[in-house]
């Protein structure tokens, strides 16, 4: 009888009946792993909470002009039109049959591939990475491990370089997804290297030593240091001097250095980008503890294609990561298409140059618009975002005040920006604001909403002396901005 009841419950749940399946699950608990039941993924962060708000009420200039505008997603949509045009002119790249040549690669792509990936694609990736670095360095295709995006690449490196309970040093502010990528499934601990605005968030030797000592005090074995260059969320690039200091530090401590360089082709203003590979090529450094992560998600605006890569100077890491990559392989069809794209050197050179130009113009548009609202940004030269200083708008000078301000901007003017605390910044009041995942008109609407928010907040302070976010009533107009009535 018990079995029949369970079968009936299962049928009701599968058929989508009104039966309360959640209640049944609570009454008949079976064991789930700690991985399935803990909150280590990091989705409870405001960084992801804002995304959910956007998903529930997305802005559309015609259908939903009062909706939430997503400024928390580092996605590059500025140059996808050029890729669409190239594919239209080269249909053979996205198909397995070349009509002009009368040849087919369908069988080759459809059957099993080993996890080395297509040789033509690894060579194309290597050549593209070289071109982004001004052809100052060479990358051996045999040292490239393909993965389904940079997320998988960073996680694979953690599995290779550290054991559960070991630690990696990460300079703040850092990408919120690192909690998931570096820690969630690997069991590796993240120890922050705290940087601050007093020196424009640069990494210093005292900060490195303090973090290393903190890890030791927690009985953690530090296995490495990971840095994004160009930085997410700062949008800045590391200098040659900074790299020399980092290399000296990791050699002294006998730990690994992981350089996440997924924005290396998105540097749009001086100073120029310097890869760790350049330093290694020009100076006498030990290389086998250095590893580079790259992806086509940001520079080409192809996050949906899930193309990531590890370039390691350590042969054992290459071999092990390649074995592990069987869990996160890139489809042969995707490799085939992008091999053709990346091998069109004339087009790719034009694409990168034009994309950088568009990023530079969009960056200037956002920075100047924010400045007119009395808001400044950290000076930056790369990436798809600005690191914005809103400390003067905080209702209180602490993390609680930062979250109140974030929630007010989201609720009252429908903008999802990312609070600095979700990037583990120790100074409240900094926000990452993305500018490349929308068209120019939507960005203009966003700036109008910010102007409206700042203006009415100033009125509120003038009349009451204190900022009370819930005391503002808001009605968004048809153009997407808000008319805010001060009570």
Image (cartoon, helix red, strand yellow):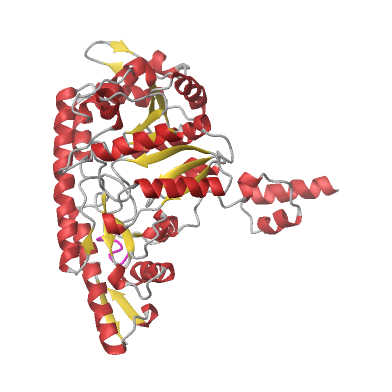
Residue 5 or residue 428, whichever sits in front: 428
Question: Residue at 32% across / 60% down in the picture?
Answer: 431
Q: Is residue 189 left or right of residue 349?
A: right
x and y percentages locating residue 403 in the rendered image: 41, 67
Residue 423 location, x and y as percent? 40, 54
Question: In which quarter of the view is residue 329 placed?
Answer: top left
Verify whether residue 404 appears in magenta.
Answer: no
Q: Residue furthest right?
A: 1
Q: Residue at x 70, y 47 (%)?
A: 10
Q: Is residue 90 left or right of residue 394?
A: left
Q: Is residue 432 visible?
A: yes
Q: Dividing the image into 4 quarters, which one contains the C terminus?
A: bottom left
Q: Is 351 drawn above or below residue 19 in the view shown?
A: above
Looking at the image, which residue sits at the far top? Answer: 102
Question: Is residue 65 rendered magenta in the image?
Answer: yes
Asked if 452 appears above or below 359 in the picture, the reply is: below
* Residue 143 placement: quadrant: top left
As displayed, is residue 245 above or below residue 394? above
Task: Compare residues 35 and 317 and report the one nearer the observer.
Answer: 317
User: What residue range appears in magenta?
Assistant: 60-67
Q: How many numbered marks, from 0 up? A: 0
Residue 96 in view (yes/no): no
| Residue at 50% over, 25% down | 326
> What is the x, y in percent for residue 102?
26, 10
Q: Left or right of 66: which side holds 39?
A: right
Point out residue 290 in the picture as x, y percentages from the top left corner.
39, 29
| Main SS of residues in magenta | loop
């Amino acid at each position: 009888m018990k079995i029949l009841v369970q079968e009936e419950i299962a049928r009701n749940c599968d058929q989508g009946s009104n039966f309360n399946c959640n209640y049944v699950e609570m009454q008949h608990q079976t064991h789930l792993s700690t991985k399935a039941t803990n909150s280590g993924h990091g989705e409870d962060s405001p960084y992801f909470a804002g995304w959910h708000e956007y998903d529930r009420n997305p802005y559309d200039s015609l259908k939903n002009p009062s909706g939430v505008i997503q400024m928390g997603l580092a996605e590059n949509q500025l140059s996808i039109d050029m890729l669409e045009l190239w594919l239209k002119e080269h249909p053979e790249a996205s198909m397995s049959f070349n009509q002009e040549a009368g040849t087919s690669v369908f069988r080759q792509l459809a059957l099993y591939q080993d996890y080395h990936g297509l040789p033509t694609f690894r060579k194309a990736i290597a050549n593209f990475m070289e071109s982004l670095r001004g052809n100052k360095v060479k990358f051996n295709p045999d040292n490239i491990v393909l993965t389904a995006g940079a997320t998988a690449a960073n996680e694979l490196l953690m599995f290779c370089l550290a054991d559960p309970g070991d630690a990696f040093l990460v300079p703040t502010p850092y990408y919120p997804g690192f909690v998931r990528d570096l820690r969630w499934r690997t069991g590796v601990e993240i120890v922050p290297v705290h940087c601050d605005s007093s020196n424009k968030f640069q990494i210093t030797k005292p900060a490195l030593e303090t973090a290393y000592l903190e890890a030791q005090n927690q009985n953690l074995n530090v296995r490495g240091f990971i840095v994004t260059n160009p930085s997410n969320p700062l949008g800045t690039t590391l200098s040659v001097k900074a790299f020399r200091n980092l290399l000296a530090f990791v050699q002294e401590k006998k730990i690994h250095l992981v350089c996440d360089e997924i924005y290396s082709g998105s540097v749009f203003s001086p100073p120029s980008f310097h890869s760790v590979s350049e330093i290694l090529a020009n100076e006498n450094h030990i290389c086998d503890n250095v590893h580079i992560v790259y992806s086509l998600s940001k520079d080409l605006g192809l996050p949906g294609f899930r193309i990531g890569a590890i370039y390691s100077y350590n042969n054992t890491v290459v071999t092990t990561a390649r074995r592990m990559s069987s869990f996160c392989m890139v489809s042969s069809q995707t490799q085939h298409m992008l091999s053709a794209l990346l091998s069109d050197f004339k087009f790719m050179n034009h694409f990168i140059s034009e994309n950088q130009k568009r990023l530079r113009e969009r960056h200037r548009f956002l920075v100047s618009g924010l400045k007119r609202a009395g808001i400044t940004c950290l000076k930056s030269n790369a990436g798809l975002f600005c690191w914005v200083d809103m400390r003067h708008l905080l209702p209180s000078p602490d993390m609680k005040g930062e979250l109140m301000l974030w929630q007010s901007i989201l609720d009252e003017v429908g903008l999802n920006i990312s609070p600095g605390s979700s990037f583990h910044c120790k100074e409240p009041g900094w926000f990452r604001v993305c500018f490349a995942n929308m068209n120019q008109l939507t960005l203009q609407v966003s700036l109008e909403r910010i102007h409206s928010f700042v203006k009415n907040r100033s009125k509120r302070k003038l009349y009451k002396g204190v900022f009370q976010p819930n005391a503002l009533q808001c009605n968004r107009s048809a153009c997407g901005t808000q008319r805010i009535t001060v009570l």
